[in-house]
Image (cartoon, helix red, strand yellow):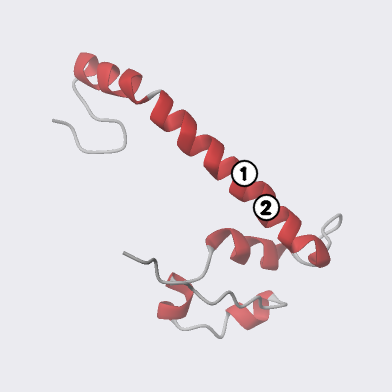
Amino acid sequence: MKRRQRKRVVRQTWQDLTRFSDAELARTNLALTNLVCAAGLPGFELPALSQYLGVLDKWAKHVKRELRRNAHRRERDSKRDGFTHGGPPG
């Protein structure tokens, strides 16, 4: 099954994001939204946006690997403690 490609639209200002509908915001990359909102803050360069997104993608992949690697610990702890991490008891 082929994944549906989303068109990446980079808005230059947070003001542009305020004009998005709820549906458009729901489809917007949260990291991208945060970075666009950071534009203009000291030390942030908008031309480096793709670099920042690349770093965030690497972090996300690392977290995903670590969660998979440590899944047995979460399962063990959930059974011992009687709850599921990130979900309702039981």
- Dot 2 falls on a residue whose secondary structure is helix
Neighbour tally class for label 1: few under 14, some 14-19, many 20 plus, Cα within 10 Å: few
For the residues bearing labels 1 and 2, Cβ distance under 8 angstroms: yes
Residue underneath mark 2 = 54
- Residue 79: which disc? none
Q: Which residue is nearer to you in this view: 65 or 80?
A: 65
The picture places residue 75, in percent across and down from the top left corner, at: 26, 22
User: Identity of the amino acid at label 1?
Assistant: Lys
Outermost residue on the top side: it is: 80
Tell me where residue 12 sits by quadrant. bottom right
Q: Is residue 10 left or right of residue 6?
A: right
Q: Report the residue at 42% width, 25% height from top.
A: 69
Q: Is residue 50 left or right of residue 74?
A: right
- Residue 58: which disc? 1
Outermost residue on the left side: it is: 90
Tell me where residue 84 sits by quadrant. top left
Mark 1–mark 2 Cα distance, whole angstroms, equals 6 Å
